Image: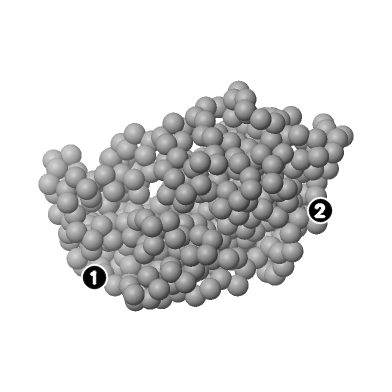
Amino acid sequence: MRGIEAALKVLTSDSGGKFSSEALRILADREKMKSPDISLASSLIYIVMRRKELWEKISADYIRSKENLPIPVIMAVLMGTGGLLELRRFSGGVLVNGIIEYLRRDKSTAKYSGLVNAVLHKVIENGAETLEKFRRSPSVDGRAMFAGIPTWSLPAWSRTWTRQELYAIFEMMELPSYSALRVSPDKRDELTAMLDAKGLRYNQSDISPAIRLNESMLPAKVPGFNEGLCTVQAEGSILAASIVGKFNKGGMILDMCSGRGVKSAQILQECPSSRAECWEISEARSKSAVRELERLGVLERAVMKAGNALSLTPDDAPDFVMLDAPCSCSGTWNRKPESKWRLDWKKLDSLVATQKKLLERAVSLCKPGGYVLYITCSLLKQENEGVVAEILSGHSECAEVSRLVDWKGEFFRRGKPYGVYILPGNSWLDGFYCSLILKR
């Protein structure tokens, strides 16, 4: 019951901009929740966020009242609908009873408990059949909702991919997300010994130098993480950052948007003769990046600066610039579903404008003869080829490196015409886009 209550609290609270995973962690620490309750709450929150639009559509068919329902009631309906249709190892009756009990505790929601109870029993009776209709829907809208793709974004997807390609990507978005471990240099044997000791199931990736766990784990819970033996990192991210090591000649590297330092640390581990300057606009993420670089023993070769990448100045002119640009994160919507519901067309257009400014700055900072690697975790053309094309058109001294990497197989697509897409085709891959620019 505590897991149900915690999930509803997180879904209905004003988190101050925090993502639900962070809000749940804070709540769990404060209330000293046990692991099974945390796991249930996390699963319920993920279920709601992954297919929020679909649960709204299904549950709306069972709500006769047209009045505006309070947010806690709406979230109770969505969580109940999604939980009943997706949870496999939890009693539907217990879930419904827990939701109703939660609503009855507050006068503002108690009067809606009968409505919610009736809706959820309709879901029990008819929801599975309705869900199957969406799975087999002949329309792009229906298939998108089943895959958890916001329908507002479909025009952008349709400008990037054919309908056949879209349906294939939608199916990829339905896969469960598991943890991949990037192994620190010369630490594989030590790490696998620790995994074996814990009885964890794993296998070697066939497309990246990563170990694949057969489950999803928080970094701090992974054996060897605190000791610096590995990093929890999706394979798409590993592949994208590995391009730096393939083309870098040992000079100064600038990471313009370092985030929490995961790719920065990877680059420094793979380029032992290089130094890096890392920029991050968020002071909190900048501090996290320092801790990440220190955890992996590469902090002494890095300079960390908190500030806007459009105004910061590097200490030395970089030979290689990596720009992991802020984006829609559409390639990671399956793993991190909450971000997609914070977007709309206006915000997407704003992101594209920022991406163009950042890539323009990256090109201006790079030394002649150096490289600029443009990365997004987006699968939308306007954030990828569209941005690269505009910058290249204004810089005759720049050209894209067409023979980027030797990635082959069903998970990779050449951009139209620039860059390479990594598709989220298995449980360890997120979607990414990469384009390498040579400044002659």
Q: In this view, does 193 lie to the left or right of 167?
A: left
The picture places residue 412, in percent across and down from the top left corner, at: 69, 63
**Depth order, front residue of 277/415:** 277
Q: Which residue is the site of mark 1?
A: 91
Give the residue type that dot 2 points to. Answer: Ser
**Depth order, front residue of 302/353:** 302
Q: Which residue is the site of mark 2?
A: 402
**Residue 258 lies in what quarter of the image?**
top right
Determine contact: label 2, label 1, CB under 8 Å: no
Residue count near mark 1 (Cα–Cα under 10 Å), binned few <14, some 14–19, many ≥20: few
**Depth order, front residue of 430/346:** 430
Give the residue type that dot 1 points to. Answer: Ser
Residue furthest out toward the right: 396
**Element at label 1:** loop
Answer whether residue 329 is visible to the viewer in this image.
no
Q: Image quadrant for the N terminus?
A: bottom left
Q: Which colour scheme is used?
A: one colour
At horizontal 33% and vertical 60% (from top left) the residue drawn is: 221
Q: In this view, does 422 lie above or below 265?
A: below
At horizontal 26% and vertical 69% (from top left) the residue drawn is: 90
Q: Specify the label residue 327 is tagged with.
A: none
**Residue 283 lies in what quarter of the image?**
top left
At horizontal 25% and vertical 57% (from top left) the residue drawn is: 38
CA gap between label 2 and label 1 equals 53 Å
- Of the numbered discs 2 and 1, the one sitting upstream in the chain is 1
The picture places residue 22, in percent across and down from the top left corner, at: 34, 45
**Element at label 2:** loop
Residue count near mark 2 (Cα–Cα under 10 Å), binned few <14, some 14–19, many ≥20: some
Q: In this view, does 188 lie to the left or right of 414?
A: left
The picture places residue 181, in percent across and down from the top left corner, at: 48, 63
The picture places residue 45, in percent across and down from the top left corner, at: 34, 54
